[in-house]
Amino acid sequence: MSNDNPTFVPTVLQDAVNWAQKYSLFTYPFATACCAMEFMSTMGPRYDIARFGAEFPRFSPRQADLLLVVGTITERQAPVLRRVYDQMPDPKWVLAFGVCASTGGFYQNYTVMPGADQVIPVDVYVPGCPPRPEQVLDGLMALQNRIQEHRGHVQAELGNTAAIGYRDRRRLPVLSDGTSMTLGLDERMPKDGRVR
C-alpha cells in the first residue's frame, strides 16, 4: 500500500502548478521597433490581454517569465537579448512578435539577425507586419496550452516551437512530434500577414 501510485501526487501537483503559471504570466517586453505600438493596442480595453493573465509588464528580467521579443534584433542587440534571457528565472518562455523578430523581416541586411531564434530559443512565433491583436492573443493561447502540457520552457531541440499565422513552409518550425502548429488568420487579414 505504500507504493500504489507513486506518480499520482507529483503529476496532479505539476498540473496545478502549470495551470496557475499559464494564467499568471509576467511579461518582459524587449521592444525594438514599430511592432511595439501594435502590442500596446493588445493591452487596451478592446482586446484586454489581462483576461489571459499577461496584463502587467515587468521591467526587470528577474521578475518575468515571458520574454516578448518585439521587433528587429540587430547584431549589436543580440548580446543584450541573450543577457536578458539568461537573467530570467526558470521556467521561462519566449514569444517572437512580428515578422522582424521571427525572420528578420524587410529590414534584414548585414546588421540584422535573421530571427530571434538565432540568439535565444523561441517557443511561439507570431508573424505579421505588424501582427494584429487577434494573432497576438492566439499566440498567447498557444503558449498557455504549451505551459499546461509542460512543453513550453524545455528547449531540448530546435524544433520545439509553435507558429501562429502564415510563414514560409520551408522555414516553419516543427514541433518535437514532427508536426507544425499553424493557426490560420480570419478573412479580414491578408494571407501575407501585412496590414495595408
Image (cartoon, helix red, strand yellow):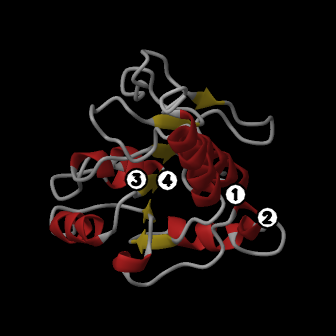
Identify the mark nearer the N-term, 1 or 3. 3
Q: Which mark, by number, is residue 100?
A: 3
Residue type of the residue flagged with mark 1: Pro
Q: The disc labelled 3 sits on which kind of residue?
A: Cys
Find disc 2 in the rendering and name its residue: 47
Q: What label does residue 133 carry, if any?
A: 1
Q: Is residue 37 above or below residue 117?
A: below
Q: Which mark is residue 123?
A: none
Corner quadrant of residue 186: top right
| Residue 76 drawn above or below residue 136 | below
Residue type at numbered disc 2 = Tyr
The answer to whether the residue labelled 4 contacts the one labelled 3, judged by CB atoms less than 8 Å apart, is: yes
- Report whether residue 131 is seen: no
Cα distance between the residues tagged 4 and 3 = 5 Å
Other residues around mark 1 within 10 Å, as few (<14) / some (14–19) / many (≥20)? some
Q: Residues within 10 Å of mark 3 (few under 14, many from 20)?
A: many
Q: Which residue is mark 4?
A: 98
Q: CA distance from mark 4 to mark 2?
A: 18 Å
* Residue 10 x/y as whole percent: 51, 43
Q: Amino acid at mark 4?
A: Gly
Q: Nearer the viewer, mark 1 or mark 3?
A: 1
In space, the residues marked 1 and 4 are separated at their CA atoms by 11 Å
Whole-percent x, y for residue 32 in the image: 38, 71
Tags 4 and 2 in contact by the CB under 8 Å rule? no
Kind of element beneath mark 3: helix
Return the disc, 2 or 1, that comes first in the chain's sequence.
2
Please tell me whether residue 79 is drawn above or below residue 149 in the rendered image: below
Q: Could you tell me which secondary element the residue under label 4 belongs to?
A: loop
For this orientation, the residue located farthest to the right is 46
| Front-most of residues 21 and 158 | 21
Where residue 128 appears, as percent x and y from the top left, is 55, 47
